[in-house]
Amino acid sequence: MGKRLKHSRYITGFDGIRSLAVIGVILYHLMPTQMRGGYLGVPVFFVVSGYLITDLLLQEWKQTGRIDIKQFYYRRMKRLYPALVTMLVGASAYITLFQRNLLNNLRGNVISSLFYVNNWWQINHGMSYFDRFSGESPFTHIWSLAVETQNYILWPIVFVLLMKLVKNKGKVFLGILGAALFSAILMAVLFKPGQDPTRVYYGTDTRLFSILLGGALAFIWPSTRLKAQIPKQAKRILNGIGLGSLLLLIVAFLFLRDDLSFVYYGGMFLVTLLSVILVAITAHPGASWNKWLTNPVFTWIGKRSYGIYLYQFPVMIFYEAKVNVANHTFLHTIMEVILILFVTELSYRYVEKPLRSFNYRKTFASLKKSFWAPIKSRRKIGFILSSVITLVAVVGVIIAPTNKVDANQQALQKQIEQNKQAANKTEETPASSASNDSAQSEGSTSSSEVPTSLADKYDLSRREVTKAKNLKVTAFGDSVLLAGSKGLTEIFPKMVVDGEVGRQLKDSPPLLQALKDKGELNDTILLSLGTNGAFNKDDFAQIMNVLGDKHQIFIINTHVPTRRWQNDVNATLEAASKEYKNVHLIDWYNFSKDHTDWFYDDQVHPNDVGSIHYCHLIAKELLKGE
């Protein structure tokens, strides 16, 4: 199908739908507390893609009686590959030159992206789409392109088999519908509440229903068979249904959080159905939505939506690694959006558009011309620059280590792991035994003797150290708590530590309830949560529903300057300390913000020096009311 199909329609309103989808995805990453369900832009993309591809295949089948699969693949590769390769080369070169801590697993990321199996590569390597703190990489988002392209590879072949063997379009429609339902049910079956949902979020098998439903729509709603002239009443009904689906989609974008079980138990399927309805109404020439979703802004964004999606993560990850975005979040958000759009426009203008008319002979001739061009010409400068960037990227991919951590990360991991093992023992060891062990470790000869070295080490008075020996504390938190827990259990030998790397506040209520049911919550509770993602007042209220008002609860705020949720988290914790009489704020942020030497390279976890100050502050606050 080298030539354009007769009667084929370009539906400009689809650029509007793509614009809404990509805006949702971008804002989900840049403003997670405001656009909680923006990730749902991806199933919207999938529906549009499934519909358009299948609609074109149906037109080709009707007009020629066959599908030129080779041409289909060729067109898809011309559309998708140039920008993807450009992004991979540019990002790899940048990492090699300026952000070598991201070299780890670069080769696996690049190769899996080039072969469109990145979603399964990420699943097999235990990557998480939802670990907002430590798991983000410039290539995290390639999973969706892999899912979509795997469909592009298989669907034309399946389509031909269905048309030849089944023939009846109604039966084919029902068959695709059945496959979509199976995929959605598989998502629900494989989803495990309380666990990271990345497997079902990334899996081709569990996400295919969105593309399949878009494809199914094309069989009963072909774009070239819809009538432009319809009764006014029918037009009003279509427009009303379109408005309803759009409004519900916007509500889902704003409020449907990715950690809700409902999303995986049918919620994403319902959002897909809403997308199918909006696509159907926009495709209908008798309705007004095609016109309403067509404007210069949406047309510009829609045509570049693939590039915007592609370049968003590299720009965000590279920018936020160099800039402390927690302060002036709105300004940095605008800067990142501008950078994403700027890079996308360069790619669209100089890579995507020129290569859509890719031709082996012309491209070879153009490269030859660039090679022999005068040294000061724009063509030669561009050729040299792109060659150097490509060479740097190739070197980076070759030298990239696999599953390796640098010395700084290794030291932090070792510290956290050792402290976690020690923390596990605090949960198993009776308080009196823990107290005796601690006294022996300080070299005390009797239980009444105060270990002076402990007071000196943590800048505490002898009286405070004596009080700390008898204070029973339950400490519950994330990796920051684990990084400092060795010192805390030295000061508070009767402290029980329950810490987990990557733990989020909004996942904590059932875990705290389990501790409560086992009778493991002491009168004094220390909470260290907020490092790994944003939460709101209602999330904290759920924790208070579990803990009640009988405990004295101390909450440590966060020092996460490279993450945009830092100030929101700290403001929420401060508000909670004022709202609940038994909640007390430990202001670690203001205590530590001017001391970069207290932290590992990530500027989040306290190092050996920082841990002493961390423990000093917590001890002072916990012992204040004793």
Image: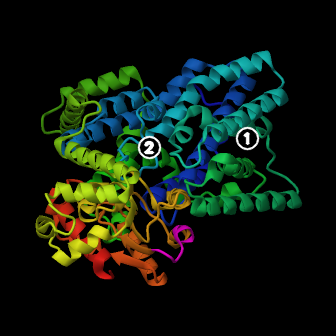
- The answer to whether residue 548 is magenta is yes
Kind of residue at disc 2: Ser
Residue 572 or residue 498, whichever sits in front = 498
Which x, y percent locates residue 395?
20, 29
Q: Residues within 10 Å of mark 1 (few under 14, many from 20)?
A: many
Q: Label 2's element?
A: loop
Q: Which part of the image, by quadrant, shows the N terminus?
A: top right
| Quarter assignment of residue 319 | bottom left
| Quarter assignment of residue 70 | top right
Does 170 appear above or below 305?
A: above
Q: What residue lies at 80% left-to-right and 56% top-to-bottom?
A: 238
- The answer to whether residue 596 is magenta is no
Which x, y percent locates residue 546?
55, 67
Which labelled disc corresponds to residue 128?
2
Mark 1 and mark 2 lie on one chain; the one further toward the N terminus is: 2
Q: What residue lies at 70% left-to-right and 57% top-to-bottom?
A: 289
Which x, y percent locates residue 524?
40, 71
Residue 235 or residue 308, whichever sits in front = 308
Q: Residues within 10 Å of mark 2 (few under 14, many from 20)?
A: some
Q: CA distance from mark 1 to mark 2?
A: 38 Å
- Extreme residue in the front direction: 446
Give left or right: position of 194 versus 156: left
Q: Which residue is the site of mark 1? A: 223
Visible residue check, residue 322:
no
Visible residue check, residue 154:
yes
Residue mark closest to the camera, 1 vs 2: 2
Residue 462 or residue 249, whichever sits in front = 462
Per the rendered image, the range of residues in magenta is: 543-551
Q: Are marks 1 and 2 in contact (CB under 8 Å)?
A: no
Q: What residue lies at 74% left-to-right and 58% top-to-bottom?
A: 242
